[in-house]
Image: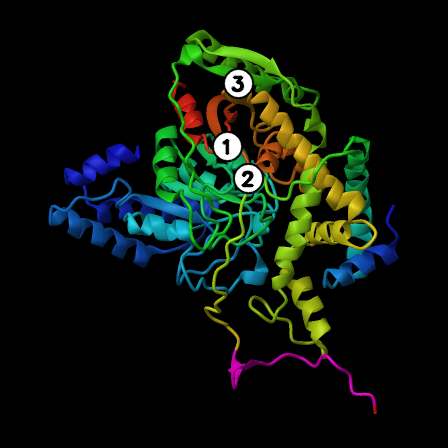
Amino acid sequence: MIRELHQSLVKKEFSAVDLAKAYLDKIKKEDKNINALLTICEESALSQARVVDEKIFKKENIDILSGVPCAIKDNILVEGVRCTAGSKILENYVAPYDATVVKKIKDRGAVILGKTNMDEFGMGSSTENSAFGPTKNPNDLDRVPGGSSGGSAAAVASGMAVFSLGSDTGGSIRQPASFCGVVGLKPTYGAVSRYGLISFASSLDQIGPIAKTVEDCEIVFNAIKGRDPIDSTSVESKIQNPKSKIKNLRIGVPREYFIKGIDPEVEKIIRNAIKKYEDMGAKIEEVSLPHTEYALACYYIIATSEASANLARYDGIKYGHKNDKADSLLGVYLNSREDGFGPEVKRRIMLGTYSLSAGYYDAYYLRAQKIRTLIKQDFEKVFEKVDAIFTPVSPSVAFKIGEKVQDPLLMYLSDIYTIPINLAGLPAISLPIGKVAGLPVGLQIIGKHFQEEKILEIGKLWI
Amino acid sequence: MLTKEEVKHIAKLARLGLTEKEVEKYQKELSAILDYIGKLKEADVSGVEPTSHSVLLENVTRKDEVFQFNKKLIEGYLKVKSILKNHD
């Protein structure tokens, strides 16, 4: 889609301003039903589009992303634009600078239409934890779009943006992409700079693209990847992604991912997709990731521990909401955080604080880090034998709004197939491969570290 | 099951103000989550090194700059509530 838009812009079939206006109109018409966007940047979007049109007018070469309308998850900073992370505590926070990924796409001339809704600080699987109301799934407005990048996935699925940026800590790009029927890529940990991403769990967070096609995801990923001198965890990959013929492709299917709890209709569609790749010539092999059963518990220790430290900065003093009614500094902290954070964020801060507290550190945090090693080693062993691993993205299709919000554990289980990938730092895509009663199902394709290109190539084989 | 006192203690460590109702709610919810997380005790981790980052990295440092405060500075200082109490 991006390639076609680029051609049309260069051939002057329409202008970048026309294109931006068409998308802004679509947002004005449809977003009152979907609530995918928290902030619309009409003025700056049109001025970005005008710059592109001038270049085209002067017959200058333009980048493939120039003039392409996009939306950015509201935990990624765009200079001068409000950035809430879906939280009341940052309701009035205006970003003082551009995140590296934003700077990169702006430099290429992409047009930023707005900021997308999300679960508060990325903590959730349905976008129901946003302080600004849930996003609806464009396929069925009574259902969730997934989360936490639910606004980013819904905006693309409903045609309100050509692509969007999301972030993924335990499945927050892939699960909403699966629920909304679009493509989402979670890159290798470190492949994309996190500078300017509001931190949730720093050893797991990664920014990635959501788009309608695999090729579009690839174009955006190539634009945002690379080492960033101001993100010490970013890496310039020198790893080659060798192209291989499909008949030489070895695909692993882990038996631990097809157990009790998966919707049989979802399993059927996933099995059919795997069969289709086998028919195309790939070698399918059953593999084992024996520590899978510990992944969710391991994740909920590590992610919440890191979050409890990262979110300590929202104290009413440095920035964000401040409740000044108390007469002591401690009172200001307690009250500001009580008013500012929603229930899931409080729950996770409490869990993380508990895991890190004296007497529990060894039993919880340290043990979880050791289990993380075992989970990582499971993948390393399997990747000695196969080029990619196929699994479902989520055990079910999009669920109803309100269905799981009262039961945190049940909600957490919808990320059971995506979480191990973050713990191991691997890249994975969610590829829409079918529907159950009109609701999309995503296939997860997991690759070796820094082999995004490989899994994207495999995704492109799907017709 | 966590006690209410434990929940209040964790909330204080986390600098979170909680209402009595929330204390009860989190007592139940956190206990259920901790029960689930208890399954980590079954895993054999003897001789296993902990992983803090999934991709091996070296330390890199950068200048720590303050971009902007949305709070008013007074002669270059940030005004906060008193920390020490006056006992006279």
Instruction: Look at the image and say whether residue A345 sits in the magenta stretch.
Output: no
Query: Which residue, given by chain and number where applicable, does mark 1 sit on?
Result: A449
The vertical placement of A115 against A463, above or below, is below
Residue at disc 1, secondary structure: loop
Residue A419 placement (x, y as % from top left)? 61, 35
* Residue type, numbered disc 3: Val
Q: Nearer the viewer, residue A408 or A167?
A: A167
Q: CA distance from mark 3 to mark 1?
A: 13 Å
Task: Name the residue at 50% across, 64% down.
Answer: A93
- Look at label 2 and name its amino acid: Val
Distance from Cα at disc 1 to Cα at disc 2? 8 Å
Q: Main secondary structure of the magenta part?
A: loop
Decide whether residue B86 is among the magenta residues.
yes
Residue bounds of the magenta highlight:
B72-87
Q: Tell me residue B54's x, y (percent).
A: 58, 39
Q: Is residue A275 above or below residue A94?
A: above
* Residue at which label 2 appears: B55
Left or right of A370 on screen, residue A276: left
A124 left or right, relative to A50: right
Residue B79 placement (x, y as % from top left):
60, 81
- The answer to the question of whether label 1 and label 2 lie on touching residues, with beta carbons closer than 8 A, is yes
The reply to whether residue A417 is visible in this rendering is: yes
Residue under label 3: A386
